[in-house]
Amino acid sequence: MTALCAVRRGTLYVNCPVFLIILASAALALAVVNFSLVGSAVLGVLGLGCAWLWWSYFISQWRAWALSRGVDPAELHKRAVQAQLEWPKGSVFERTEIRRNGR
């Protein structure tokens, strides 16, 4: 498997649900709280939190899956950063990943 193919699959299974969670929380804010500023802010923060948790957990699952199929780790990371699937090495946000087995 190529790194590009793995990144495409990662975008589908990791980033697309992140965007859907954010959109669903925005739609819920509009439908439920009826343009209340406080209610919209609370639902917005909850939506962002849920989306971040999704990404934090599933990015390491995706990476393990890709590496188990023989994708070069350096190429995978380079392509994933370009596709905005992963953060650059050393980024504060990279540290929010929920890694398996301490990896």
Image (cartoon, grey):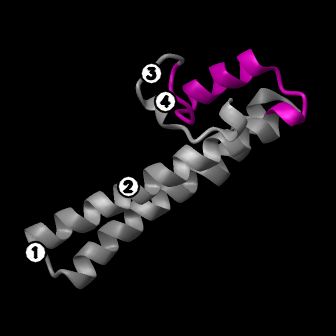
Residue 94 placed where, x, y %? 50, 29
Residue labelled with disc 1: 36
Q: Which residues are magenta?
A: 67-88
Task: State the separation of the CA atoms marked 3 and 4.
Answer: 7 Å
Q: Which mark is residue 95?
A: 4
Q: Quadrant of the N terminus?
A: top right
Give the CA distance from mark 4 to mark 1: 34 Å
Q: Which residue is mark 3?
A: 91
Decide: few, some or many residues near mark 1? Use Cα within 10 Å; few <14, some 14-19, many ≥20. few
User: For residue 49, which numbered disc appears in the image?
Assistant: 2
Nearer-N-terminus badge (1/2): 1
Q: Are marks 4 and 1 in contact (CB under 8 Å)?
A: no
- Crowding at label 3, few (<14), some or many (≥20) Cα neighbours within 10 Å? few
Closer to the camera: disc 3 or disc 4? 4
Q: Amino acid at mark 2?
A: Gly
Sequence-earlier tag: 4 or 1: 1
Which residue is at a point 43% across and 59% down the rendered structure image?
A: 50
